[in-house]
Image: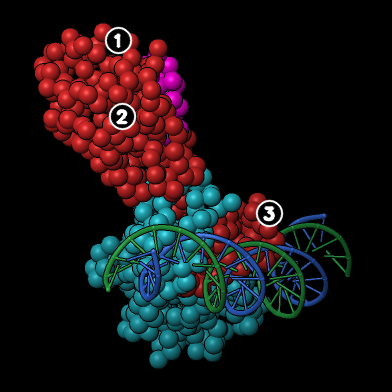
Chain colours: A cyan, B red, C green, D blue
Amino acid sequence: MTLSLRALRYVQAALQHGSITAAADAMHVTPSAIAAALDQAEAIFGITLVTRARAKGVFPTLTGRDVGRGIDDLLERYDTLMSGVSDLKSSLSGNLAIGYNAPIAPAFLPRLAAEMSAAHSDVVFTFTEGNNDSVQKGLMDGQFDVILFVEELPNPQIETQPLIFAPTYCLCPADHALAQHETVSVSQIVQESLILLDRPAARGYYMDLLEQGGSDLRIVATANSTEMVRSLVASRIGISLLNMKPRDVLTYAGDQIRCLPIADSTSGVTLSLGFAPGPKRRLVQMFVDNCMASLQGPLGADLIVSKP
Amino acid sequence: MTLSLRALRYVQAALQHGSITAAADAMHVTPSAIAAALDQAEAIFGITLVTRARAKGVFPTLTGRDVGRGIDDLLERYDTLMSGVSDLKSSLSGNLAIGYNAPIAPAFLPRLAAEMSAAHSDVVFTFTEGNNDSVQKGLMDGQFDVILFVEELPNPQIETQPLIFAPTYCLCPADHALAQHETVSVSQIVQESLILLDRPAARGYYMDLLEQGGSDLRIVATANSTEMVRSLVASRIGISLLNMKPRDVLTYAGDQIRCLPIADSTSGVTLSLGFAPGPKRRLVQMFVDNCMASLQGPLGADLIVSKP
DNA sequence: ATAATATCTCAGATATTCTGAGGTTACAGC
DNA sequence: GCTGTAACCTCAGAATATCTGAGATATTAT
């Protein structure tokens, strides 16, 4: 047998008011309900909590007072928990766990985090890198509050918010012949030596685009890191295709490269945020809002290569 | 809207097991009940606590885990409170508040307390002196756990335990003429100069006895303290009637007095314990038991004056 | 494909809690 | 002493909350 919270509140009221009737008024119920709760509590505890005087009210016994203190404490903690969770929902502090796939994340997430950190000093960020699948899985497992990923066959359980569409572009050394043009075509690209980004999904995705220009491809290298792809291009081993670019297009080695839109292709990927459906913490919502505002402004334009 | 304790337990179980079905098994209810509790909690908190995967179970979100910790803490405190109260009931420690009327209490209560204190070092005694009415009132008000009083027209709400019957006896100086006898009679007493203990109830009580021996009484003094009555007797101002006696019959002044049973009177008072009806703390019960054992043994015999 | 496993939904059953009426007890004022 | 008032007590029936059980649905594993 267990004593319900409601019963505890009634007992508390009775002990505090020293009167069943007064407690009943305070709790907006009839005295019977209070009396029943008292009876129940005494039965469960096996102890007399109050002495009852018919015309005067009830008087807590010494033990009743002790128990009352314990009940006060518990109920206060209950209330704190309840309002605390609501606070958690609405507060702009606490931990924000972000999983990301997009290789581009390091180019803009830190800036966003810095802004949020400055505005709300007690926010703690947890960044976790993964691939497009692992971050989705991590989201469903409760590992992340929000993920940054490429929305393509997304898990239907995930609620998504598109941030930016990144057209596929061509990457070539600054002194390459193609670099003279404003744009390139698929047919021009497929004649060159090619370097392929080899990551889950991405490989097939780029192959589809290239096969649109002919099937005789000269793939001279693959790499599973965008930074390596860029460096390979800068080293004049070949040209490549990518979707997003860091804000400055220098490689680690410092060599110059150019990013050219592809005139005759509408291919591209959508960079999206994903989160568990349902109501969100205010902190999460703020992050989402900040991402949208940021990527749909000039910062966003720096991260993609669009046609002129 | 408030979340019931039961719902909290279900949520806790669901979070811990990562499965509604498993939680349902653990709680011995159907999965529907668990799911309902989860829904309710999420609705009340306005926050998603778990992501649900149809064939895999449920996965706590990060906030879900946070909330879960809060719930764990609260439920543990609830359990502690519940078992704590039961412990309070059964433990032989804590505070024992004793109210007493009987002027004789200082003669034996300290000894009892010392024994209990030695056996259970964390018992704290609170002794409060009062008159026969005030201690009864104090008991009903929850001021005392137990009272020591004279059971005469007791409040019917008080549960009593008789300890000892104290016959009325005659008190006279050791060198008084009456002191030669083993017993005295009422007719002998009424011829002497009399000192009367003047306390509520007591006065009328002694008068009744005396009037039984004739109405021409020579009352030379009254006093409202037994110690003063004894000293007055020792000073040979007169003789008196009392019911209980301290273990040594020296007065503060060191004079000798004698205590003589009254042969032809069955008058006396019953010294009793009183306590609130209903189940008692073990500590209180032990005190009651100790009192009975003590006063019904040789210690008790020392406190009264019985006929030879 | 098929089986197994888990959640979802919802109507009806069950259990808990509350109300309301009538009764009892104790105190206070005349 | 009598009477009115203010409490508490009891209990049957009503209202509310909670649970069950059956069928549906979705996902994973074989």
- Percent x, y of residue A7: 48, 60
Please report, as a chain letter, where disc 3 is located: B
Q: Give left or right: position of A54 versus B136.
A: right
Q: Residues within 10 Å of mark 1 (few under 14, many from 20)?
A: few
Q: Residue type at mark 2?
A: Gly
Q: Position of residue A27 (x, y in %)?
A: 41, 70
Task: Tell me, yes or no, if residue A96 can be seen here.
Answer: no
In the image, is B4 to the left or to the right of B275?
right
Answer with the quarter of the image where residue A12 lies. Answer: bottom left
Q: Nearer the viewer, mark 1 or mark 3?
A: 1
Judged left or right of residue A275, residue A210 is right
What x and y, as percent, mark residue B277? Answer: 47, 45
Residue B295 on the magenta segment: yes
Q: Is residue A21 visible?
A: yes
Q: Secondary structure at mark 3?
A: loop
Residue type for callout 1:
His
Of the two numbered discs 2 and 3 in the rendering, the one whose residue sits closer to the viewer: 2
Please tell me which residue is depicted at 32% across the width and 20% down the height of the picture.
Answer: B185
Give the residue pinned by disc 1: B181
**N-term mark: 2 or 3:** 3
Label drawn at residue B213: 2
**First reached walking from the N terminus: tag 2 or tag 1:** 1
Give B83 or B13, whichever is nearer the viewer. Answer: B83
Q: CA distance from mark 2 to mark 1?
A: 19 Å
Judging from the image, mark 2 belongs to the subunit labelled: B
Q: Which mark is residue B28?
A: 3
Q: Which residues are magenta?
A: B284-300
Q: What amino acid is labelled 3 in the image?
A: His
* Nearer to me, B257 or A195: B257
